[in-house]
Image (spheres, rainbow, N blue to C red):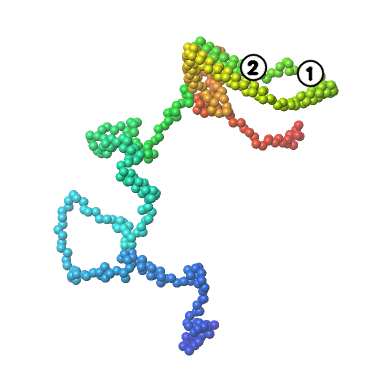
Amino acid sequence: MAPNRRLKRVVASQPGFLKIKSSKGADGSDGPRKKRLNKNKKKSWNKYSDINDVDEFLQDIRHQERTTGGLLSEKSDESLFFLDVRPKTPQLAAVEPVEEKTGRRKTARPLRIDLILQLDSKVLPPKDVLAYQRPNAKKLRRIAQKGEKLKGKGVVTRRQKRLMVRPKLDDTAKKAALEPNNNPQRDYYDIWRQESTSTADPWFLEQTGKMRVKRPDRLNEKPSVLPAVEVIAAGGSYNPDFFSHQALLQVAHEVEVKKQKEADKLVKRLAVKKENFATEETIMTEQVEGLVEEDDEENANEEEEEDESAGGIVVAVKKTEKQRRKERAEILKAQRRRAQRVKSDNQQQLFQLRSIKTSIKQQEADTKTKQTQRKSNQEAQKSQPRRLGKLKFEPQDMEVQLSDELAGSLRQLKPEGSVLKDRFKSLQKRNLIEPRDRAKFKRRLKVKYQEKRAFRAIT
């Protein structure tokens, strides 16, 4: 195989040898045949078009604009060339005298990083149109023209009047604010003082929203006048006095009696009266009712209904002219009598001025009494819990020990009640939160009971 390949290479290298597969195209030109492409779409343009020459041309134009500030073909010869008048032989630079080092620093040269960041292009940056635009420019221009016209007429606008009325700033406060810290003659400054140190115009701070709005006085009022922690009476001590302890027991007894009365009242309301109990006679009448025929009563009722229907028809009788005149005359007489009575009453009131004055004084006294009573009720309501929710406030039970339960020392004292519950009730009593009940657990699905076989076998 190897000699055959070598022979083929030798033959192919000879000048008169023609290959079977020629590289010439159908038209006799060298190279492969070019592929025919459709360039009727933009996708084919971008894919098969050669735009390297266009890119090089545009890149050259951008380079000229960046380095020279424009195209070289459009520039004049004076801007591109200059006459070099320097000597061809270099001259030795004169040796500058060395200056002695002084305390002054040398002029600072720009850093290399700053030189790199500087613009090296002579193309001007694009103009930012949005930077020159003003919102509502036409409206502001119209307002300014109107203001100039009014100023020419001598008219002072409301805004200018407000600016004129505005108080002037205190110059001393400005000077104090601008005073340097290293001045030993400056005034003493207390960092813990409460007053505001702002020297700006209060009107300006109010208009710009930097000044805090004044809190209304009604929001500073407490919802209740009761103290946060109520101190129990002296009888609630671990070793109280006899009389103070008995007084506290009396108060607790009155509370329990009141609760018992309310419970008894509810029982009385729900109780059934003796009159409403069923007897043998009432039971018999209820059983027999509807079984006995009462034809006579039904017939009597039907006759009464027929009489009423017959008597309900009224025949209209036409009045004569004489009767109509008489009715009109009676109406006029009644109107005259009423007018005469009103007139006589007004005249009679002139002789009752003294009694009218006394009645007015009595009404004013009653009004003052009602006002004082209303104020006292309002003051009393401040110490009472209000109705803030659907539930009514229920006070906590009094924690009182009987005489035989008293301990002589703190060691033997037994704790009662809960601090958490006491604080919770205090918040409700002072109208800070609404009265609440413990949330009830509501089961969504029923509990399914299953009897196991082992249980059946045992029982």
**Front tag of 1 and 2:** 1
Most foreground residue, 321 or 143: 321
Q: Quadrant of residue 53?
A: bottom left
Q: CA distance from mark 1 to mark 2?
A: 31 Å
| Mark 1 secondary-structure assignment | helix
Q: Amino acid at mark 1?
A: Thr
Return the residue at label 1: 282
Contact (CB < 8 A) between labels 1 and 2? no
Quarter occupied by the C terminus: top right
* Circle 1 residues within 10 Å: few <14, some 14–19, many ≥20: few
* Circle 2 residues within 10 Å: few <14, some 14–19, many ≥20: few
Any part of residue 176 in sight: no
Instruction: Give the residue furthest to the front.
Output: 322
Q: Amino acid at mark 2?
A: Asp
Residue at figure coordinates x 50%, y 77% from the top left: 34
> Mark 1 or mark 2: which comes first in sequence?
2
Q: Position of residue 430 (x, y in %)?
A: 50, 25
Q: Determine whether 108 is above or below 122 in the image.
A: above
| Mark 2 secondary-structure assignment | helix
Instruction: Give the residue furthest to the top.
Output: 243
Instruction: Give the residue furthest to the bottom.
Output: 16
Q: Determine whether 317 is above or below 83 in the image.
A: above
Looking at the rendered structure, which numbered label has been put on residue 189?
none
**In the picture provided, is 395 more to the left or to the right than 58?**
right
Return the residue at label 2: 264
